[in-house]
Image (spheres, rainbow, N blue to C red):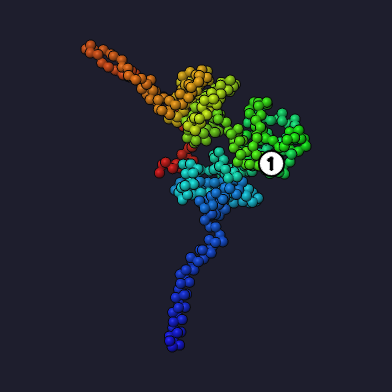
Amino acid sequence: MVAGERSMGRSVVDTMDGWFILKCLPFMLLILVSLFCDTSSQTGYTVELSRSNFDQVIGSNEVVFINFYANWCRFSQMLKPVIEDTAKAAREEFRQQGLVVVAALNCEAEDAIAKRYHISKYPTLKMFRNGKLAKREYRSQRSKDAFLSFLREQVKDNILQMQTKEDIQKVDETKRNVIAYFKSSNTNEYMVFKRVASALRDDCSFYVGIGDNFRSETVSGDNIMFRPPRTKDQDMLYMGSMVNFNLLHTWSQDKCIPLVREITFENGEELTEEGLPFLILFHRPEDVEIVKRFNGIISRELVGDKGSINFLTADGTKFSHPLHHLGKSVKDLPLIAIDSFRHMYLLPNIEDVDVPGKLKSFIQDLHSGKLHREFHHGPDKETPQATVQLTAGGQAQAQDKKRPTDPPESTFVKLKPSDNRYSFRDEL
């Protein structure tokens, strides 16, 4: 090859190399940026979650506040700048690494995660603490100040410190209490207890006595006990490992979250969102005896039904509207009813609360459809009876018995989330 041809060859190659570099440069830069910056995980100050970083983010931070959103939802669009402002302010206020993260998840792009946490309305605001989902989602005011106030409460130390043994008398007997004694707070045992107390702050009050003033309580080592409401001599001692977070959390959760809960106007929306019908005891607040009887029969016979119905008590003097729908008033208390979110069904005789199998049968009749069927068609019978009425011409005419009116409509369904604050997935 002559010199001119070699020069021309190099020129062509150089030109092709230059063209290749120019065409590929944007992609090369994108790869370099992706190596050094996780652009998919953060937009501004809000951490954008995906399947690639979700578990890592919630597992490595004490409090993660997540906005589950959908781009088509106008409420989500309205909330997005508020969340971003909150994330910016939170980063400035909570400077400790791993303490607070404000995040967001696009439920359309990350449908599997949305389904895992049963997201059916947008936006939904949930909090994770030490990798575990908090039982209650955020339902208060949607403003930066309200969000920050909420986050401040979540990072506060909720353990009440006892200074002397006499302070045990100050424990609030109306609440469910976990009481612990430690030789020192600079131990793994105490740090595990602190994490559990933080996780269950909405369900129990936590008390601790530390040091020499409580030496008599720690002779055999640190100990933790649960004290049920309105008791002083029924403490239940924790017998498991003091450094096993999951074990202590499970034990405490079992004690702190009762089988029978009280419904109030504050937690009503949350309870309806669990999607289970209600078995409710309406009672006067001073009638503690009927509450004990109700709790007793449920503990003895209905534990296996807790996955299909919620067991609740309600102050009948406050929830007078449901009583009115049942054709009852405060003077008729106590009463037991089922609310299926379509209709309400009244247990005919309150004294049946103590009869073995009666409440069980009442619940089974709900799930089988018998309660609804009998309200429309009268009691089930093997051979439906008919009344016989004579027509004007003397001819016998069979006539069905008069059917009762429809059962009262559900009142608690009105406590479900408002469509003035959420878009619902089922509307699509």
Q: Is residue 305 visible?
A: yes
Q: Residue furthest right?
A: 212
Q: Quadrant of the N terminus?
A: bottom left
Q: Position of residue 104 (x, y in %)?
A: 53, 49
Q: Quadrant of the C terminus?
A: top left
Q: Residue furthest bottom?
A: 2
Q: Residue furthest left?
A: 393
How many residues crowd mark 1 within 10 Å: few (<14), some (14–19), many (20+)? Answer: many
- The part of the image, by quadrant, that contains residue 369 is top left
Q: Is residue 121 visible?
A: no
Q: Position of residue 424 (x, y in %)?
A: 45, 41
Residue occupying image coordinates x 60% and y 41%:
246
Callout 1, which amino acid?
Tyr
Q: Nearer the viewer, residue 71 or 278?
A: 278
Q: Nearer the viewer, residue 108 or 384?
A: 384
Residue occupying image coordinates x 55% and y 57%:
38
Residue occupying image coordinates x 75% and y 30%:
166
Q: Is disc 1 placed on a helix, strand or loop? A: helix
**Number of numbered discs on residues:** 1
The answer to whether 66 is drawn above or below residue 363 in the figure is below
Q: Position of residue 274 (x, y in %)?
A: 50, 35
- The part of the image, by quadrant, that contains residue 187 is top right
Residue that numbered label 1 is attached to: 190
176 relative to 345 in the view: left or right: right
Residue occupying image coordinates x 69% and y 41%:
190
Q: Position of residue 131 (x, y in %)?
A: 58, 45
